[in-house]
Image (cartoon, rainbow, N blue to C red):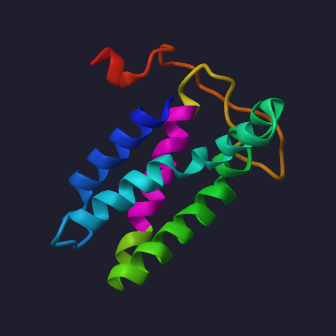
Amino acid sequence: MDIITHGLVGFFLALFVAKEFGFKNLKWPVAAGLLAAIAPDVDGFALLFNGSGFYTYHRVAAHSFIGVILLALIIAILFSRLKKDFIKYLPLALLGVLLHLLLDFVTPAGGVQLFYPFSTARVALSIMPSPDVYLLA
């Protein structure tokens, strides 16, 4: 999926669950949810350094279960420094990053290495059509 779809899904996820996690103001949780949902695509910056590097590194470390934990911790720490609510931001960030992996997992674009670094096997369910959901809507 592309970054727009991931961002929209993270945005709406945060809108729906922010109150459940105890947030009164939606501004920062929505920003955190959006950032968490696009964060695993940070490996796309490999394209800037080497064209073939994108295909080597995309959907690898940042799209693994260990990457989910590390990215969620970084996002929760970043936003908790602003608002001192680490315990609220961590589950929100975890959901956002996991949702990113789920969306990439169901598309037919080559799969993700969920178990990296323990396995380099790419897994994919490939049940979604190639166009992103927001285009179909």
Determine if residue 101 is in view.
yes
**Closer to us: 7 or 12:** 7
What is the span of residues highlighted in magenta in the rendered image? 91-104
| Residue 93 picture quarter | bottom left
- Left/right placement of residue 68 relative to residue 2 reads right
Measured along the vertical axis of the image, is residue 26 above or below residue 134? below
Left or right: residue 69 versus residue 114 is left
The secondary structure that most of the magenta stretch takes on is helix
Question: Does 34 appear above or below 25?
Answer: above
**Which residue occupies 50% across, 52% down?**
97
- Give whichever of 82, 107 is nearer the camera: 82
Residue lying furthest front in this view?
A: 48
Identified at 36% across, 86% down, the residue is 84
Q: Say whether residue 4 is left or right of residue 13.
A: right
Q: Is residue 100 magenta?
A: yes
**How far across and how far down the image is residue 39, in percent?**
53, 52
Is residue 124 within the magenta segment? no
Q: Residue at x 72, y 36 (%)?
A: 47
Side (left or right) of 81 relative to 59: left
